[in-house]
Structure formats: structure tokens, C-alpha cells
Image (cartoon, rainbow, N blue to C red):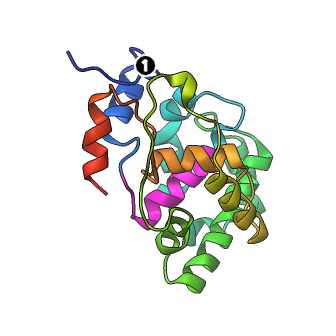
Amino acid sequence: MKTRCPWPADNPLMLAYHDTEWGVPLHDEQKLFEFLVLEGMQAGLSWSTILNKRENFRKAFDRFDPARIARYRQTKIDKLLQDAGIIRNRLKIEATVTNARAFLQVQREFGSFDKYIWQFTNGRMIVNRWKTIREIPPLSPEAETMSHDLKQRGFKFVGPTICYAHMQATGMVNDHLISCFRYKQVQKMQ
């Protein structure tokens, strides 16, 4: 039996996410945008709620294609607000459109969102050595800097806690507990 972080509990979706995605260094533009959207959607909700709706989000938001989402107009937003398969929060849906436009601007300015976002950790994974889940902080100085910069560029729902969750999800930080079987695995992926 594998020792893993306790937060997935016995939820099959959470276990699969923990074991295959969480903490893996991510450099794919569309996936980086997907996690930015999903982390923003999670604000005030559980991650399991978001994972349960992930496929619905992918369908509703054109597989997280920022170029398509950036072109959404009010009629599309109104349609999304009627979609029971996603989080029907007007501010979060509108933020997704705003963030898609800002994401494209960052790509134009930096050549890629990947190059931009990884600058906050100097292009390397921050490797922590947590023994218990209580030690894991809700944010970091890097997440605060990232949040401030994203907000300056017009992004919404990108507070420091959301940015830290994004960093954890995309492998910018390794917050697997040192006792977790994934701790050393993801560390080797950087």
C-alpha cells in the first residue's frame, strides 16, 4: 500500500488527481490556463467539487482554449450561467473571459504564458519538506508576487491563495508530504 498525502482521502477522482497531476511540473499553455480557470472557480468551494465538474467545464469552455474564450460575448456568458454542469457564478464566468484576454496578452508580451508564470520561481520547482498537512501554508511570498503582477495585468480571481494553489497544481512547488510516494517522483520531473 502506497503512503500518500491525506487530502485525497478515498475519493477516486481526488486520488487520481493526486497520483497523476498534482505537483507535476506543467509547461503546456492550454493546461496552465485550465488550472488558472479551475483554481479561480474553486474560490469558496472544495477542490473535489471542481474535479467532479471538470469535464463539464472543458465542454462549456471550449476545452479551455483561451483564444476562443477571449471572444465570448454576453450571449455566451448568459448561456454559461444556465449550465448546471459548471459553477454558475457570474463574476467567475466573466473573470474567465477577462483572464483569457489577459492570458493572450501575456503570451504576446513574453512569447508564452509558461515563460511568464515560471519566472516567479526562477524557472525551477520550489521543493518543500513538509511532514504534516498542517505545515503547508495557504500562500507564499512567490504567490503574493505572482498575484500582484497578475492583477496588474488585468487578471481576476488571482489572489495569493489561488496563486499558491496554482503553483501546487502545476508543479511550481512540491507540497507533497515527504512521506508521500509522489514527493520524490515529482521532484525528479523538474
Q: Quadrant of the N terminus?
A: top left
Residue at 27% x, 53% y: name it: 189
Would you identify the image quadrant in which residue 21 lies? Answer: top left
In the image, residue 114 sits, relative to residue 135, either above or below, namely below
Residue at 40% x, 44% y: name it: 23
Residue at 79% x, 46% y: name it: 90
In the foreground, 82 or 16: 16
Assign a secondary structure to mark 1.
loop
Would you identify the image quadrant in which residue 19 lies? Answer: top left
Does the rendering let one see residue 71? no
In the foreground, 107 or 127: 127
Query: What residue is shown with label 1?
Result: 6
Left-right relation of 171 to 57: left
Left-right relation of 16 to 74: left
> Could you tell me what secondary structure mostly forms the magenta stretch?
helix
Q: Quadrant of the C terminus?
A: bottom left
User: Measured from the top left, where is residue 35 in percent x and y?
Assistant: 52, 51
Does the rendering let one see residue 171? yes
In the image, residue 73 sits, relative to residue 175, either above or below, namely below
Does the stretch in magenta take in 176? no
The range drawn in magenta is 25-39
Does the stretch in magenta take in 28? yes
User: Measured from the top left, where is residue 168 in percent x and y?
Assistant: 49, 45
